[in-house]
């Protein structure tokens, strides 16, 4: 049985309001934000001998 079958309609509407994405669409994403999303700001690792080191 799903939760949507058990909950009343007004509770579902409240949950939709609370769980809906925030209204951050007003401010555009910066270049740094995009780099974090794309994963280019992650640490890189390389193997040196038998150890793994962070670059």
Image (spheres, rainbow, N blue to C red):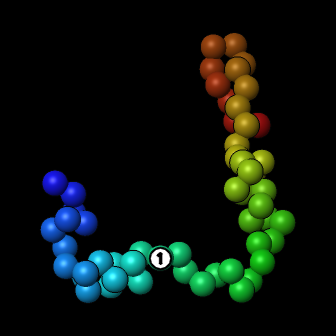
26 or 39, nearer to the observer: 26
Identify the residue at horizontal 15%, vertical 68% (top origin).
Answer: 6
**Left or right of residue 9: residue 45:** right
> Image quadrant for the N terminus?
bottom left
| Pick the front one: 9 or 53 | 9
Q: Outermost residue, right direction?
A: 31
Query: Residue 4 location, x and y as percent?
Result: 25, 66
Vertical order, 39 against 21 (above or below): above
Disc 1 residue crowd, few under 14, some 14–19, many 20+, Cα 10 Å:
few
Q: Secondary structure at mark 1?
A: loop
Q: Name the residue: 69% across, 13% down.
A: 49
Residue placed at 78% from the left, 56% from the top? 35
- Mark 1 — residue? 20
**Residue 25: quarter of image:** bottom right
Give 5 or 46, whichever is nearer the viewer: 5
Q: Position of residue 22 (x, y in %)?
A: 55, 80
Percent x, y for residue 34?
Answer: 77, 61
Task: Name the image quarter holding the C terminus.
Answer: top right
In the image, residue 34 above or below residue 14: above
State the image coordinates of residue 26 (x, y, percent, origin top left): 71, 86
Residue furthest to the top in view is 49
The reply, left or right, for residue 39 in relation to residue 50 is right
Q: Is residue 31 left or right of residue 14?
A: right
Residue at 79 percent across and 64 percent down: it is 32
Counting the numbered discs, the total is 1
């Amino acid at each position: 049985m799903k939760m949507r079958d058990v909950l009343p309609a007004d509770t579902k509407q409240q949950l939709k309001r609370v769980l809906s994405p925030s209204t951050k669409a007003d401010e555009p994403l910066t270049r740094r934000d995009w780099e974090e999303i794309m994963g280019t700001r992650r640490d890189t690792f390389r193997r040196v001998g038998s150890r793994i080191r962070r670059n």
